[in-house]
Amino acid sequence: MSAERGPRPWPIHAFAGILCVAATVKLVRGLLDVEAQTFALQRTYPTLEWNNDLAIVLMSADTTIILIPVVAVWMFRSRIARILVTVMAIPTVWLLVQFAFLGLGVSGPLLADSGLRLLAVALLYTPAASAWLRSEGDIDVGVFR
């Protein structure tokens, strides 16, 4: 797998930018209040003994899991990574559907984060992004219109 050269269509740049910013913001918010993250993890997974170090490791791993497919799409034109990112978005959609049907309120940050992630995934299916991912490295100027 070699790095792609040449320009990328704007939806690919937007996809990478949105997910990089969303992952970084989530990591920074977690690191600014590690105690709250540890408490939330303890509530969510009570069978494990959580401490601040484990919470930091989990937050870092979560960020890495988000960024690896972003790099694969943006840098290596990976169609498989597009599928992986789409599959990774299914729990987000399922969570929002559950909140909608159960009539529960969704917090503003959760709604914003979920909406941005879904927008980023949708950008991968725009005509320009799809054409760029389908091409084999040849530059098609029609992709950038």
Image (spheres, helix red, strand yellow):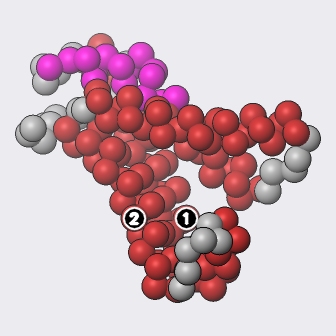
Quick one: label 1, few (<14), some, or many (20+) residues within 10 Å? Answer: some
User: Around disc 2, counting alpha carbons within 10 Å, would you say few (fewer than 14), some (14 to 19), or many (20 or more)?
Assistant: few
- What's the residue at 51%, 77% (across, down)? 55
Position of the N terminus, as image quadrant, is: top left
Q: On screen, 101 above or below 111?
A: above
For the C terminus, give its image quadrant. top left
Instruction: Report the mark closest to the observer, 2 or 1.
Output: 2
**Magenta-drawn segment:** 122-136
Q: Main secondary structure of the magenta part?
A: helix
Residue furthest right in the image? 103
Identify the residue shown where x is 54% and y is 65%.
25
Q: CA distance from mark 2 to mark 1?
A: 12 Å
**Is 64 left, or right, of 51 in this rendering?**
left
Image spot of residue 106 (x, y percent): 81, 51
Q: Is residue 137 left or right of residue 28?
A: left
Q: Which residue is mark 1?
A: 26
In the picture, residue 131 is in which quadrant? Answer: top left
- Residue 65 figure quarter: bottom left
- Quick one: label 2 or label 1, which is nearer the N terminus? 1
Q: Which residue is mark 2?
A: 61
